[in-house]
Amino acid sequence: MTGPVVVGLDGSPASVTAAWWAAREAADRHLPLVLLHSWTTQPLDVPIAQEAHSKQRYGREILERVSAELLHRHGDLDLTTELVSAPAAHALLERGESAAMIVLGSRGHGSVASFLIGSISLHVLGLTPCPAVAVRAGDPAVEAGWSHPAAADLDEVVVGVQEPGVADGPLLEFAFTAAAARGARLRAVRALPLTSLVTRLDEDLEADERVRLAEALAPWREKFPDVPVTKHVAIGPATQVLLAASARGCLTVVGRRRHPSHVTWKLGPVAHAALHHVPCPVAVVPHD
């Protein structure tokens, strides 16, 4: 994985938490970090005048403050800042063409968006050609300052495998790389639909799916031999199975199909549910 880690920073608590997560990720993966602020796309509650120069001053102050904090924590971090006039969604999608990942703040359960207002963040998550990660303010899995260390018992990278096969390559590569960088266990989750029980016994179905999952994981286990792996196969709705499996997650990874259009976007039901309900950062990885 090459390119920088790009984080959208608007000064809100969620975006600052996202910046801390992104800095740790960049440091662990030896990647550059870019803090990007769009002065034309700022939180509605910013207590400043609406003049352009005031908005730009606010943006510069936020970038300077957060970059100083992150460099104090990660002294050798390759960090740059960008103050842009382009709309936030446009700027992030443009940088997503060459970024290793895009990182966004999330307000929390029930709504995704902090750096971007309303559905625009979902637009970025659904369209960017690189993986995108949503991070909540106050997330216990994220170090967000000297007084807010990450919880030690959240030590698994959880990846939802909807259908084992070649298409899951980018998803599994991202998940294994994340686990290796953290020294974490990887939990590969496969949910089996309830309708399968009409023709198969529980034991036979689960045994067959464990074999399929093991085959899909095999090349990545060979590439990342130091990453311990747990195969998690369960019968039930995919969203419920993934949520239950993420109890010890420091990161949950889900996939989305690439969309042929560069204008319209689509996130599947599992990705939507994960972004709204999984209690840790969620990475959405595009794949064919």
Image (cartoon, grey):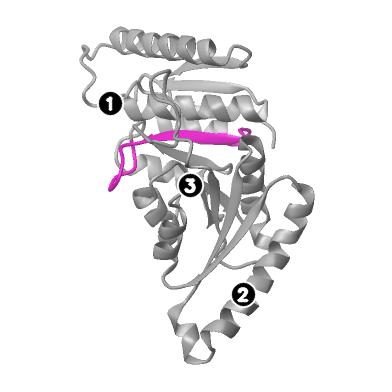
Which is more toward the observer, 92 or 236?
236
Asked if the magenta segment contains residue 32, the reply would be: no
- Residue 135 in the image: above or below residue 218: above
Residue 186 visible (yes or no)? yes
Q: Tell me which corner region of the image, top left, top right, bottom left or bottom right, holds residue 206.
A: bottom right
- Amino acid type at circle 1 is Pro
The outermost residue toward the front is 153
Give the vertical position of 192 relative to 201 (above or below).
above
Q: Secondary structure at mark 1?
A: loop
Give the magenta part as a residue range: 96-113
Residue drawn at (63%, 22%), measured in percent from left and top? 32
Q: Which residue is mark 3?
A: 249
Within 10 Å of disc 2 (Cα), the crowding (few <14, some 14-19, many 20+) is some
How packed mark 3 is, by other alpha carbons closer than 10 Å (few <14, some 14-19, many 20 or more), is many
**Mark-to-mark CA distance, 3 and 2:** 23 Å
The residue that appears at 49% across and 40% down in the rendered structure is 133
Asked where in the image residue 113 lies, by quadrant, the reply is top left
Asked if residue 175 lies left or right of residue 249, the reply is: right
Tag 3 near tag 1, CB within 8 Å: no
Work out whether 140 lies above or below 146: below
Q: Are marks 1 and 2 in contact (CB under 8 Å)?
A: no
Give the number of the disc on residue 43: 1
Is residue 287 positioned above or below 132 on the image?
Answer: below
Q: Earlier in the sequence, mark 3 or mark 2?
A: 2
Counting from the top left corner in percent of width and height, residue 13 is at: 32, 26
Say which element carries label 3.
Answer: strand
Q: Identify which amino acid the numbered label 3 is placed on.
A: Gly
Say which amino acid is labelled 2: Glu
